[in-house]
């Protein structure tokens, strides 16, 4: 059999460069209406002779190439994608249509405000939507992703202390935090101090008090935390930090557990980012683009990145650059605007009641899954969870089957695996976030698959340890990839 | 479901939130609207923005109006690309992984370097990340920045560097519009120049690289108009050690400035100092070729506060747009596109000179250049707008020494007729 098709209509597909044939091209330029010129003669040695590494393919070859590639991906539109902390909810098609309107997609960030009033109005409204949802006073829409939002938030905290003549040197980060938290603090020149979670999975006031001093600029906290557990002592913790002049940064990765139910700003959070690609349904795009707006309390508003959108007394909108205590500019333009448009459409489509209902269903779904899995999998913490749950492979210890094997076996059952081995404080964690998008039948099928895998682990452990069996590619050798890196194609 | 969980009502699931913090009112947001209503509402907002499909468009400055072939959006809109996430599970992400590997390969060829990452947020943050990388490699603390770097890139660089111990010096712009390599010494970590520079002039990278290397410094080249890579000498071949910038021109809509596509390439020797994700080739247990995320011990999810960058999510779908765009154009199409941009811009320059306007810089340009006006720039821009022409960027805020001047960008989308109208509008009554 030829290498074209491996199994049914699952195709093999070579690299673009291997498919390339001299002289082919997939585009046509219109006939030129200006004089031809000799670029080489005009530019001399400033010009290049050739384009190494560029393929030559016809349009249909390119279309087939990427269509075939696409069929090798799991996706939300294909099925449940329970990647914990990533909130792989449905991405409404309306949002895609709205963002492609020419009056958005073909606009330029340096067009004057007077010629882009529709966009500025939308920015102004979206800022107020996010402020109301979070209980913050002002919001910058500029950060391009959650991690850039963290960076901006910590910069604002640094500017806040600097304005008060304080050179604080440390940032506290719980041991259950996302890796971006310590990395963002370090990029700001702060020493990162890890604070241990309690045996019940949450942060305790005494642990924070022990680490807190007047050298500490901020505590970064995710709430609910990466175990899906609400930080019940958060208000008291915020008081401890505030009493020593510190600020509290809220990682908004899990805001989808709180929308319409509680507001971080009311809990004592001073600065937080929003992941629009999580809570607000913008697509994850195979790894972005996301968007990471940041909300702040009024005391930090002078430090927002420039420019900010303001509304004049005649209800026209303008860019305000005159913020003398701003941290400066964070993005080359106005941020990932296309994602802002989609989030706006999502908030308009759900409204206040729908947003709250989405939160309730996300929490219901996570708790239902946890109830179904309890017993077959180890549940490391007894505290109630909100939008996601963490279970472990401890019940499988005697079988030799690990969390990684369970994850890979889920693929054979037609599911994208959950986040694995995170948070780091849980050995063998499977972090499961079903989102509100799934029906009870869908959750039951997924739970059935996980229960069946636990059963397989006891009866046929080799079956699980060798998974996946039915994918185009089976387990890949990551050690080899790192040891002898091949990071581009080169002609043989 | 509630019975299985063992609670009487959904509210009981939220009891871990202290009652005093639970909202007792509905959020103060507009009531839910239907799909039809939302499209009408957003359509009305969209209608209040000037855009390039309804105007003769000559505004660039780091965000460029290029034609995007229909196949780009058709392919990128496939849900398997749009609604997947970072390829953490390689067995079911080979589509995204192979496309990133192809992107990395093409960007190495275009920039003349050996390793490319899987994108950064935008040209400005990619440039800041490139400088941070150069600081890590060189272990020095002085950064020499061209005066002709995009002012927004400079601003973002200053924001990113805010907490660090460093010294920024500015390399002056010569009368011909190009950067002069002065003030370099053994403390200089890197020389940062934009190619073509913010004012459209093509820099002599070989001379700048020699000057940087003579002091043991790296040359970092930032590219804001990626189509120029198809025509100009590859920065890596000219001696650049790190090339970074913005690849929006490769099929990504202008979209009011984002999402766009930051990129970064470097020499293999520096790969462990690179920020962002990398895809590498390997084999599976059956010996079949496949791709995985690799060298991730540089990254925040492994190394936390000692990571090379805090970046996590990047610009995956924009990378996919650019990869499809580059595959469709290929070797001959991309070169033809770049040559067409040059030809259109040269035609525009000739028309403006013929109309008696001054183009102050002698250095060659690609598709963007400065023209000095005889009247206040704001008045000229307003006159052009009234004729349906977005004539360029007023430079008073960025380069006041040039007087009433515009930065004009002419891509393949400009017709000869629209260029002629531009020349008339800029020249005013005297033509």
Image (tube, coloured by chain):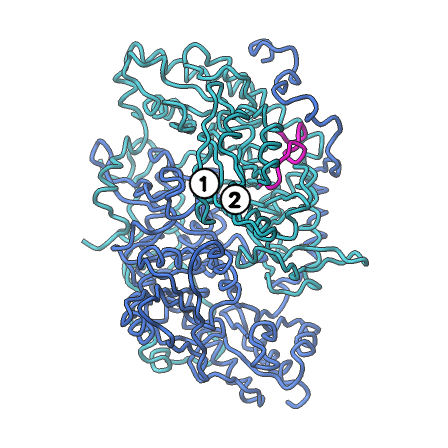
In the displayed structure, B425 sits above or below A51; it is below
Residue A31 showing in the rendered view: no
Left or right position of A224 against A113: left
Left or right position of A154 against A360: left
Question: Dot 1: within a 10 Å radius of its alpha carbon, few (fewer than 14), some, or many (20 or more) residues?
Answer: many
- Determine if the magenta segment contains residue A271: yes
Chain shown cyan: that is A
Chain shown blue: that is B
Labels in figure, total: 2
Quadrant for residue A353, please give it: top right
Left or right position of B116 against A253: left
Residue at x 66%, y 14% (from the top left corner): B9
In the displayed structure, B38 sits above or below B368; it is above
Q: Are marks 2 and 1 in contact (CB under 8 Å)?
A: yes
Q: Nearer the viewer, residue A376 or A378?
A: A378
Instruction: Looking at this view, name the residue that lies furthest to the left.
Output: A492
- Determine if the magenta segment contains residue B377: no
Left or right position of B257 against B30: left
Residue A444 showing in the rendered view: yes
Q: Which residue is mark 1?
A: A180
Whether labels 2 and 1 share one chain: yes
Q: Answer with mark 2 or mark 1, whichever residue precedes in sequence.
A: 2
Q: Quadrant of the N terminus of chain A?
A: top left
Q: Which residue is mark 2?
A: A150
The location of residue A261, given as percent across then percent down, is 67, 27
The residue range painted magenta reads: A258-272
Q: Nearer the viewer, residue A94 or B126?
A: B126
């Amino acid at each position: 059999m030829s290498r074209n098709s491996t199994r049914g209509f699952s195709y093999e597909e070579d690299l673009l460069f291997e498919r390339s044939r001299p002289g082919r091209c997939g585009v046509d330029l219109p006939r030129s209406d200006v004089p031809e010129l000799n670029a080489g003669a005009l530019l001399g040695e400033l010009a290049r002779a050739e384009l190494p590494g560029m393929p030559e393919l016809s349009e249909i070859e390119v279309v087939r190439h990427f269509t075939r590639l696409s069929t090798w991906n799991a996706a939300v539109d294909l099925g449940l994608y329970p990647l914990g902390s990533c909130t792989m909810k449905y991405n409404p098609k309306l949002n895609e249509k709205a963002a492609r309107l020419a009056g958005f997609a073909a606009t330029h960030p340096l067009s004057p405000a007077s010629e882009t009033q529709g966009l500025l109005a939308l920015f102004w409204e979206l800022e107020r939507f996010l402020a109301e949802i979070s209980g913050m006073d002002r919001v910058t829409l500029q950060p391009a992703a959650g991690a850039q939002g963290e960076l901006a938030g910590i910069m604002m905290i640094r500017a806040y202390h600097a304005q008060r003549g304080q050179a604080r040197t440390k940032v506290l980060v719980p041991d259950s935090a996302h890796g971006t938290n310590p990395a963002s603090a370090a990029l700001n020149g702060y020493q990162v101090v890890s604070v241990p979670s309690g045996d019940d999975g949450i942060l305790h006031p005494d642990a924070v008090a022990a680490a807190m001093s007047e050298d500490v600029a901020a505590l970064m906290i995710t709430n609910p935390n990466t175990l899906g557990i609400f930080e019940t002592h958060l208000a008291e913790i915020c008081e401890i930090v505030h009493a020593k002049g510190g600020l509290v940064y809220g990682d908004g990765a899990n805001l989808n557990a709180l929308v319409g139910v509680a507001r971080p700003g009311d809990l004592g959070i001073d600065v937080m980012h929003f992941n629009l690609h999580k809570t607000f349904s913008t697509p994850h795009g195979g790894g972005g683009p996301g968007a990471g707006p940041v909300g702040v309390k009024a005391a930090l508003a002078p430090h927002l990145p420039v420019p900010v959108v303001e509304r004049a007394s005649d209800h026209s909108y303008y860019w305000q650059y005159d913020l003398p205590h701003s941290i400066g500019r964070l993005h080359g333009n106005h941020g990932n605007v296309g994602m802002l448009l989609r989030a706006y459409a999502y908030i308009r489509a759900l409204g206040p009641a729908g947003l709250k209902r989405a939160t309730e269903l996300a929490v219901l779904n996570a708790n239902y899954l946890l109830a179904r899995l309890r017993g077959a999998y180890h549940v490391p913490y007894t505290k109630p969870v909100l939008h996601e749950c963490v279970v472990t492979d401890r019940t499988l210890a005697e079988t030799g089957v690990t969390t990684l094997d369970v994850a890979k076996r889920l693929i054979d059952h037609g599911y994208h695996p959950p986040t694995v081995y995170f948070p780091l404080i849980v050995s063998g964690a499977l972090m499961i976030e079903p989102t509100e998008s799934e029906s009870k039948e869908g959750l039951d099928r997924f739970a059935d698959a996980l229960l069946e895998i636990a059963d397989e682990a006891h009866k046929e452990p080799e079956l699980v340890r060798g998974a996946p069996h039915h994918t185009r590619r089976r387990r890949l050798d990551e050690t080899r990839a790192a040891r002898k890196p091949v990071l581009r194609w080169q002609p043989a | 479901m509630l019975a299985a969980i063992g609670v009487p009502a959904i509210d009981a699931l939220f009891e871990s939130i202290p009652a005093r913090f639970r909202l007792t009112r509905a959020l103060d947001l507009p009531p839910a609207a239907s799909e039809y209503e939302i499209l009408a509402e957003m359509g009305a907002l969209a209608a209040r923005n000037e855009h390039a499909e309804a105007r003769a468009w000559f505004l660039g400055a780091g965000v460029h109006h290029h034609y995007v072939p229909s196949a780009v959006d058709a392919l990128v809109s496939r849900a398997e690309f749009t609604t997947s996430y970072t390829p953490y599970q390689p067995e079911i992400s080979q589509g995204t992984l192979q496309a990133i590997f192809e992107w990395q390969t093409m960007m190495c060829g275009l920039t003349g370097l050996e390793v490319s990452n899987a994108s950064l947020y935008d040209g400005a943050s990619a440039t800041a990340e490139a400088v941070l990388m150069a600081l890590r490699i060189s272990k020095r603390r002085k950064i020499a920045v061209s005066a002709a770097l995009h002012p927004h890139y400079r601003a973002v660089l200053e924001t990113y560097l805010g907490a660090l111990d460093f010294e920024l010096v500015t390399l002056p712009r010569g009368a011909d519009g190009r950067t002069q390599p002065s003030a370099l010494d053994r403390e200089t970590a890197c020389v940062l120049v934009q190619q073509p520079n913010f004012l459209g002039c093509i820099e002599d990278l070989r001379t700048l690289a020699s000057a940087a290397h003579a002091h043991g410094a790296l040359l970092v080249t930032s590219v804001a108009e990626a189509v120029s890579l198809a025509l100009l000498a590859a920065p890596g071949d000219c001696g650049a050690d790190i090339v970074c910038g913005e690849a929006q021109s490769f099929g990504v809509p202008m979209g009011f400035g984002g999402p766009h596509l930051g990129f970064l390439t470097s020499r293999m020797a520096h790969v462990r100092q690179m920020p962002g994700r990398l895809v590498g080739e390997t084999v599976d247990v059956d010996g079949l070729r496949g791709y995985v995320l690799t060298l991730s011990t540089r990254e925040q999810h492994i190394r936390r506060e000692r990571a090379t960058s805090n970046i996590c999510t990047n610009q995956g779908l924009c990378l996919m747009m650019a990869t499809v765009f580059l595959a469709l154009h290929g070797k001959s199409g991309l070169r033809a596109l770049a040559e067409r941009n040059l030809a259109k811009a040269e035609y525009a320059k000739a028309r403006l000179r013929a109309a008696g306007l001054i183009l102050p810089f002698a250095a060659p340009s690609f598709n963007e250049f400065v023209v000095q006006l005889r009247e206040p720039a704001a008045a000229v821009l307003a006159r052009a707008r009234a004729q349906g022409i977005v004539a360029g960027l007023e430079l008073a805020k960025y380069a006041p020494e040039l007087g009433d001047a515009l930065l004009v960008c002419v891509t393949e989308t400009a017709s000869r007729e629209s260029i002629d109208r531009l020349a008339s509008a800029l020249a005013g009554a005297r033509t």
